[in-house]
């Protein structure tokens, strides 16, 4: 910025220097970002580890997560069982690793469904306005007026029990939140002067939506998406806890907590492992989302 | 900066049809509760000729920006017609209109808001060309960089983002963007109002230069009469959605026919040319009335020292009092307004 401050318009008088063609390459930019924002980098690393656990659960887990050992029920952590065993003598560490894949799959599925449904609906409602907006908004209000988990249970009831169906329904329940957010942004953005300028150039509505409205509306959406990832993890836990999600004996973090809850009086430590896993993952999603928001905003770049 | 240079239409341009022809234009906005209407523009007619600078001045709320938005095709008339280069928008299909309207561009008051903050300057420059077709990306890029140089900016600014540029630079980018479109009419809505005083002159000069080279017409909208007078061939004075006076710049400045024009020039804080000093100064009292409920008769009668009974009851006719010089006032004559009667002396006229 310094080279052009004092006479505010100074560069106007100094033409032709050959244009700098490229911005720094992607690896270098990622490195810069990690140095700038180490907490986000750690959070990203955590997410990466969780994703790797999810992908390679079979290789990482020391035991079969469904293998029962009645000789070692509700054991405390030991060298043999890093996080102890549960009420059926299954290795908690192995179940945690395998549960990661269910939980991450669940959260990603829910948020993807919510984004795919919510963002276009919100864009169209906000940008078009008029009676289309009226109808869409009333529908969204109707959806939002139900308690989310009740609605998810109802939708799961229609779609059928199972993790995928449960998370599809959670995605449908989340969608109005994203739609509302995007609608509100689109309402403001369609009045921006750069949109009017684009209209003067002869831009179509599709172009304006994709090039001007969406990129400027996406920032709060990304943050909301990462928040919803965290809520999605918890929703998976709730639905699995209620028996609508992951079906036994396959593990997910939610069903593990549900199981531990029954034995909370005898072995309260059973809840720690899946509980902390959910907490850390949710936190990591939030942190990465916040950093992403800043990184995407060119005005915050130096 | 001198207006005779800008006054000559470009030699290659057809001057028989006006570049924009506005007939009985009215623009009404419903209020939020839907119970009333705001008459932003009320029954205004004028032509803008090819290659001329048509100045529109008025206070905020006078409807001048609304007229500008109509001229840029951003707003459709509530009543009346607008012909763009002899063509009515209603006769064009949506697709045809999208390519047709490229000849009618607008530069906005806020140079930052007119640029998408997430697009590099280069992307902003390329945007208009993407809708033109018939150019590959290398050609578009080279034309974009040429345009940047044409408005006096370094080529390497192309990869910056808008927030890294000064206000004056951003306004230059906004100008550069429309150059590849070869516009016939550019609506300049308070284009220098948001800029530092030191930069205003440079930007105005750039507008004059571009007009000389490209033969484009301007609708130059501002509240500052000195700036409008400096650049315009003709001036229209707006008040509460109506034209008060319209004529050649020199004629309007030197021999104003309408009391409101006199009041506007009296309010001018900057030193005026010698021949404007020591003449009737008129200080207006009160605020501009609400356009939701404009006064009957002549719109200006609530603040006009010349106002009499007829002004309250009857709207004055739009008359050509001198060649090419129109006004709407009951009391004025081709030689100007009569001296103020004494009874209005206490209203602030001297």
Image (tube, rainbow, N blue to C red):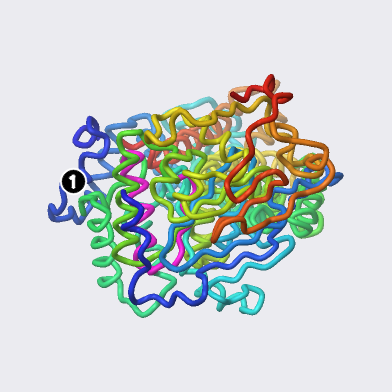
B52 to A108, vertically: above or below: below
As drawn, the residue found furthest toward the right would be B35
Residue B61 point in image, percent of width and height: 64, 40
- Left or right: A222 as drawn, with respect to B12: right
Nearest to the observer: residue A110 or residue B341: B341
The chain containing the residue under callout 1 comes to: A
Quarter residue B325 falls in: bottom right
Residue B143 point in image, percent of width and height: 27, 67
- Left or right: B327 as drawn, with respect to A200: right
- Left or right: B11 as drawn, with respect to B336: left
Q: Is residue A111 magenta?
A: no
Which image quarter is the N terminus of chain A in?
top left
A152 to B78, vertically: above or below: above
Residue A106 makes an appearance in the image: no
Nearest to the observer: residue B182 or residue B227: B227
Quarter residue B322 falls in: bottom right
From the image, tell me which residue sits under label 1: A13
Which residues are drawn in magenta?
A: B165-190
Residue B106 point in image, percent of width and height: 48, 56
**Mark 1 Cα-neighbour bin, 10 Å: few <14, some 14–19, many ≥20:** few
Nearest to the observer: residue B110 or residue B232: B232
Nearest to the observer: residue B301 or residue B226: B301
Secondary structure under the numbered disc 1 in the rendered image: helix
What's the residue at 22%, 30% (across, down)? A6
What's the residue at 34%, 40% (across, down)? B200
Q: Is residue B167 magenta?
A: yes
- Left or right: B104 as drawn, with respect to B316: left
Residue B268 makes an appearance in the image: yes
């Amino acid at each position: 910025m310094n080279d052009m401050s004092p006479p505010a318009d100074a560069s106007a008088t100094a033409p032709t220097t050959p244009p700098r063609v490229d911005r720094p390459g992607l690896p270098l930019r990622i490195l810069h970002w990690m140095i700038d924002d180490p907490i986000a980098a750690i959070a990203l690393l955590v997410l990466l580890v969780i994703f790797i656990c999810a992908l390679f659960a079979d290789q990482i887990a020391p035991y079969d997560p469904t293998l029962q050992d009645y000789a070692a029920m509700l054991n405390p952590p030991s060298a043999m069982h890093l996080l102890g065993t549960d009420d059926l003598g299954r290795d908690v560490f192995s179940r945690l690793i395998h549960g990661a894949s269910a939980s991450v799959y669940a959260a990603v599925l829910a948020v993807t469904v919510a984004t795919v449904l919510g963002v276009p609906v919100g864009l169209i409602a906000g940008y078009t306005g008029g009676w289309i907006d009226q109808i869409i908004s009333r529908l969204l209000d109707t959806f939002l007026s139900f308690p989310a988990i009740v609605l998810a249970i109802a939708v799961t009831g229609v779609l059928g029990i199972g993790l995928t169906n449960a998370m599809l329904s959670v995605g449908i329940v989340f969608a109005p939140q994203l739609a509302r957010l995007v609608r509100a942004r689109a309402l403001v953005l369609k009045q921006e002067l750069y949109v009017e300028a684009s209209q003067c150039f002869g831009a179509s509505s599709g172009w304006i939506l994709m090039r001007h409205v969406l990129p400027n509306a996406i920032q709060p959406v990304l943050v909301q998406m990462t928040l919803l990832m965290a809520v999605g993890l918890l929703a998976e836990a709730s639905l699995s806890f209620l028996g609508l999600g992951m079906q036994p004996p396959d593990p997910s973090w939610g069903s593990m907590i549900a199981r531990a809850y029954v034995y909370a009086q005898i072995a309260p430590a059973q809840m720690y492992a899946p509980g902390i896993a959910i907490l850390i993952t949710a936190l990591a999603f939030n942190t990465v989302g916040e950093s992403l928001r800043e990184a995407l905003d060119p005005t915050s770049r130096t | 900066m001198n207006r005779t240079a800008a006054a000559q239409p470009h030699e290659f341009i057809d001057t028989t049809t006006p570049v924009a022809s506005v007939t009985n234009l009215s623009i009404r906005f419903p209020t939020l509760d839907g119970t009333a209407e705001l008459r932003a523009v009320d029954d205004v007619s004028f032509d803008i000729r090819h290659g001329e600078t048509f100045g529109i001045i008025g206070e905020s709320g006078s409807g001048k920006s609304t007229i500008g938005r109509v001229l840029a095709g951003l707003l459709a008339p509530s009543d009346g017609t607008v012909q763009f280069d002899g063509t009515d928008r209603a006769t064009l299909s949506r697709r045809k209109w999208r390519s047709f309207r490229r000849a009618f561009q607008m530069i906005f008051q806020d140079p930052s808001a007119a640029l998408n903050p997430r697009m590099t300057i280069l992307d902003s420059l390329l945007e208009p060309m993407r809708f033109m077709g018939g150019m590959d990306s290398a050609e578009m890029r080279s034309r974009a960089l040429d345009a940047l140089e044409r408005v006096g900016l370094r080529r390497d600014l192309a990869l910056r983002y808008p927030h890294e540029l000064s206000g004056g630079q951003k306004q230059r980018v906004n100008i550069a963007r429309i150059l590849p479109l070869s516009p016939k009419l550019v609506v300049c809505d308070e284009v220098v109002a948001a800029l530092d005083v030191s930069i205003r002159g440079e930007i105005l000069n750039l507008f004059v230069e571009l007009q000389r080279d490209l033969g484009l017409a301007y609708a130059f909208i501002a509240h500052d009469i000195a700036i409008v007078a400096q650049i315009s061939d003709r001036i229209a004075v707006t008040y509460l959605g109506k034209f008060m006076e319209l004529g050649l710049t020199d004629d309007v400045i030197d021999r104003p026919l309408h009391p409101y024009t006199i009041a506007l020039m009296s309010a001018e804080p900057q030193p005026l040319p010698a021949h404007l000093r020591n003449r009737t100064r008129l200080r207006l009292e009160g605020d501009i009335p609400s356009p939701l409920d404009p006064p009957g008769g002549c719109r200006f009668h609530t603040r006009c020292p010349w106002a009499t009974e007829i002004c309250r009851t009857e709207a004055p006719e739009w008359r050509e009092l001198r060649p090419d010089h129109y006004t709407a006032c009951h009391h004025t004559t081709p030689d100007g307004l009569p001296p103020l009667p004494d009874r209005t002396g206490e209203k602030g006229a001297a």
